[in-house]
Amino acid sequence: MSFVLASLALASAGAASAADEDAQAWAVVNATGALNDKVVVAFDSQARFSDDASRLGQLIVRPSVGWRLDSTTTASLGYAYIRSTPEGRPTTHEHRGWQQMSYRIAGDGKGVTLTGRTRLEQRWLEGRDGTGWRVRQQVRLTAPVQNGVRAVAWTEPFVGFNQTSWGQSDGLHLLRSFAGVSVPISKTVTLEPGYLHQRAYRSGPDAVTHAAAVWINLQF
């Protein structure tokens, strides 16, 4: 877990420099189900409350379909809709297409386990020209604690391949990291509460988010 904690420490150290900081609350519902031995469907919805968690700043809806290549590897295709309402600026509506590979790097899923998720995104903003291409690379570590509870930590850099007129930059423009626990509620429901740190790299002061976040994971 040290590599993720190191990422959190570096991000926090960077936040000590000039930055616009905000305390937020993120609630995520993620549902997945198998249609058969090979095909899985998934849907996640996110509500992100910004400005000291006082209002809904962003809403995300993201369905997908995946194909199991083997017991630890899944290829997926999906769509995402993102409605953002930044304070003092117009509301934006973003659409994304994305392709993803999820895979196990090390471990057996029961003990200490390292997994990866590589996602390629194509981004369009309503009313604006240009397609933003970027890749997201998440690395996630879990470790058993007791009674089914697992410690969870992950980090995910976002790297743009091009610049757009509506604001996407090339290179590393976002770093998101999380530390928390995974708590089984039933055979089909798991909660993952924890602390999320995000830094958006900008030409002016960076935007730093400190969020209390919870994932509600459903299996059906």
Image: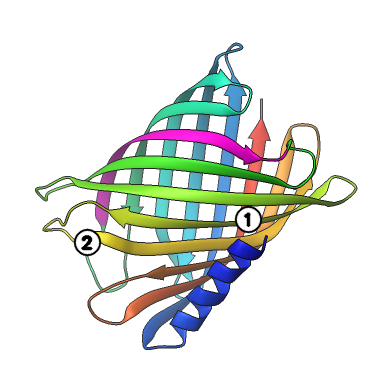
Q: Are the residues at dot 1 and dot 2 in contact (C-beta closer than 8 Å)?
A: no
Which marked residue is nearer to the observer: mark 1 or mark 2? 2
The residue that disc 1 covers is 214
Sort mark 1 into few (<14), some (14-19) or many (20+) by Cα contacts within 10 Å.
many
The residue under the point 63% across, 22% down is: 71
The quadrant of the rendering that contains the C terminus is top right
Residue 162 x/y as whole percent: 18, 53
Residue 20 x/y as whole percent: 37, 82
Q: Main secondary structure of the magenta part?
A: strand
The amino acid marked with disc number 1 is Val
- When the figure is inspected, residue 198 is found, relative to residue 13, above or below; the finding is above
Element marked by disc 2: loop
- When the figure is inspected, residue 207 is found, relative to residue 98, above or below; the finding is below
Q: Return the mark for residue 169.
A: 2
- When the figure is inspected, residue 86 is found, relative to residue 157, above or below; the finding is below
- When the figure is inspected, residue 149 is found, relative to residue 194, above or below; the finding is above
The amino acid marked with disc number 2 is Ser
Q: Is residue 196 left or right of residue 165?
A: right
The quadrant of the rendering that contains the N terminus is bottom right
Q: Is residue 147 left or right of residue 76?
A: right
Q: Return the mark for residue 2.
A: none
Residue 150 x/y as whole percent: 78, 51
Toward the right, the furthest residue is 147
Toward the top, the furthest residue is 36
Residue 211 x/y as whole percent: 55, 68
Which region shows up in magenta? 92-107
